Amino acid sequence: MELSSWKMTLCIMLCLLPGAAHAQTRVVDGDTLEIDGTVYRLNGIDAPEAGQQCKKPSGASWHCGQASIDAMAALSAGKTVRCEGTTSDGYGRTIGTCFVDGVDLGAAMVRTGNAWAFVKYSQVYVKQERQAREERLGVWQGPAVAPWDYRARLWESATEEAPKGCPIKGNISRNGRIYHPPWSPWYKRTKINTAKGERWFCSEAEAIEAGWRAPRWR
């Protein structure tokens, strides 16, 4: 076999090996990644929602939710992300710990003030949060509302106005079937037309089960 043919054959064989292909990673938000179709919710952290704002020391508002998404993108862009996880949540996502070049992405997000330690479910990043607080990094540079409190507040308010107390909007557009919870930046401007097949949902799990997906912010 000629050398050039041998090289071509070797290249093809290597490309067919499991794991040889470069995994496609997409940032869903500050604590969620999609890798080759599998959605990973990072264990132990809770990032501000996409439309959430925080306060600077001066009292001015800044878009900490979008900053968190951008931070996750900066950590993972153009790199191989490896996730370890076996359990699932109620939204079809795998709960996992993800790494880039040996760096724990959850730890990095909390340590830089781009996410909270989600102590309701895990104590693993409490140290990183304490350090970020002490250095007033990210969300800790001024008063901030924890994302779980932010979601609860908006959910309660939206539930009072939604039909049958089901506040999630199931929209249909050229981008597909997309659901918007009350904390979505697009929530207020999204109108539901039941004649088009759009509908209201009582939970994200219900929306996903019906074939709708969460919005994508990148």
Image (spheres, helix red, strand yellow):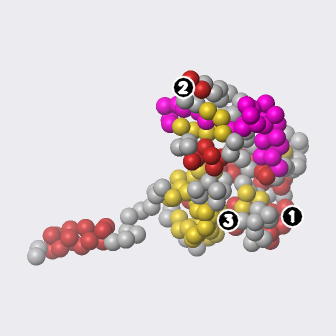
Q: Is residue 121 magenta?
A: no
- To which residue does mark 2 refer? 196
**In the displayed image of the protein, which residue is found farthest to the bottom?**
1
Q: Residue 35, position in %: x, y?
A: 50, 58
Q: Is residue 86 visible?
A: yes
- Quick check: 70 above or below 102? above
- To which residue does mark 1 refer? 134
- Closest to the camera, between mark 1 and mark 2, is 2
Work out whether residue 134 or residue 84 is closer to the camera in this orientation and state it: 84
- Quick check: 149 above or below 180? below
Q: Secondary structure at mark 2?
A: helix
- Quick check: 145 above or below 180? below
Q: Please name the residue shown 11% across and 74% down the image.
A: 2
Q: Residue 42, position in %: x, y?
A: 65, 62
Q: Please name the residue shown 50% across and 36% down the image.
A: 176
Q: Residues within 10 Å of mark 3 (few under 14, many from 20)?
A: many
Q: What amino acid is labelled 2 in the image?
A: Lys
Q: Quadrant of the C terminus?
A: top right
Q: What amino acid is labelled 3 in the image?
A: Asn
Q: Earlier in the sequence, mark 3 or mark 1?
A: 3
Q: Which residues are magenta?
A: 149-176
Q: Is residue 170 magenta?
A: yes
Q: Residue 137, position in %: x, y?
A: 79, 57
Q: Residues within 10 Å of mark 2 (few under 14, many from 20)?
A: few
**In the displayed image of the protein, which residue is found farthest to the front?**
164
- To which residue does mark 3 refer? 43
Q: Earlier in the sequence, mark 3 or mark 2?
A: 3
Q: What amino acid is labelled 1 in the image?
A: Glu
Q: Secondary structure at mark 3?
A: loop
Q: Please name the residue shown 54% across and 25% down the image.
A: 196
Q: Is residue 75 visible?
A: no
